[in-house]
Each structure stands twice: as structure tokens, then as C-alpha cells.
Image: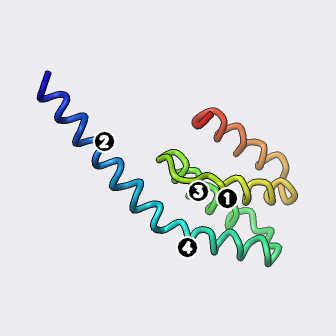
Amino acid sequence: MNQINGLIEDLIEEINIIRQNLNETLPTLRSEVDFILTGHITSIPQIEGLLDRLLDYALFGCDDGEFRRLNEYYSTVNKANSDEYDRIYNEFLD
């Protein structure tokens, strides 16, 4: 049992390291979100690529504010796809 507990603790430590590394790159992603919003970018592949990355970050417990902000904007570009991102988010994170 101690060996299992040790493995679990190691896994938790590794996840925390990953989360810390992801949080350190959030300012870059925030800049990408700002670029899309201020430039009124409507490229579905560009927006969805960033939404996918932000969703991955949220799955690791990182701040989901940028995901929510971008997806709110995306709803003005493609409501059906934005709703699908909301569904995925709610299914996995709520």
C-alpha cells in the first residue's frame, strides 16, 4: 500500500509541475485571445485551435477565463460551434 501511495504522490507532483508550466504560458495565450478579439478575427480554424489549447489548459486546472472570453466572442462568429465548446467544457469541467 505504501508503494501505491508513493506512486500517487509522484503522479500528483508531476501534475502540479505540468500545471505550473502551463500557467507560465498563459500570458502568451492571453495575447493571442486579445489579438483575435481586438482584430475581430473570424477565422474558424484559428479560433478553434486556440479554444482547443485553452480547453486543454482548463482540463489541467488552469484558469479558464481566457477560454470563456474567447468562446463568448466565438458565439458571435459561429454560435453552433461555440455551443459545442460550451457543452464539452461543461461535460468535463463542471
Mark 4: secondary structure: helix
Give the Cα separation between the discs numbered 2 and 3. Answer: 21 Å
Answer with mark 2 or mark 3, whichever residue precedes in sequence: 2
Q: Are marks 3 and 4 in contact (CB under 8 Å)?
A: no
Q: First in sequence: mark 4 or mark 2?
A: 2
The residue to which callout 2 is attached is 12
Cα separation, mark 4 vs mark 1, equals: 16 Å
The percent position of residue 79, horizontal first and vertical second, equals 85, 49
Q: Is residue 18 above or below residue 38?
A: above
Question: In this rendering, is residue 9 above or below 45?
Answer: above
Local crowd at mark 4 within 10 Å, few (<14), some, or many (≥20)? few
Where residue 64 is drawn, which disc sits there? none
Q: CA distance from mark 1 to mark 2?
A: 30 Å
Name which residue lies at 66% across and 36% down: 90
Q: Amino acid type of disc 2? A: Ile
Q: Are marks 1 and 3 in contact (CB under 8 Å)?
A: no
Which element type, helix, strand or loop, lies under badge 2? helix
Distance between mark 3 and mark 4 Cα atoms? 11 Å
Q: Amino acid at mark 4?
A: Thr
Rendered image: mark on residue 54: 3
Which mark, by number, is residue 28?
A: 4
Q: Nearer the viewer, mark 2 or mark 3?
A: 2
* Tag 3: amino acid: Leu
Please name the residue shown 76% across and 68% down the image. Answer: 43
What's the residue at 19%, 29% (across, down)? 5
Q: Nearer the viewer, mark 4 or mark 1?
A: 4
Q: Which residue does the numbered mark 1 point to in the structure image?
A: 48
Give the CA distance from mark 1 to mark 3. 10 Å
Does the CB distance between marks 4 and 2 fall below 8 Å? no
Label 1 element class = helix
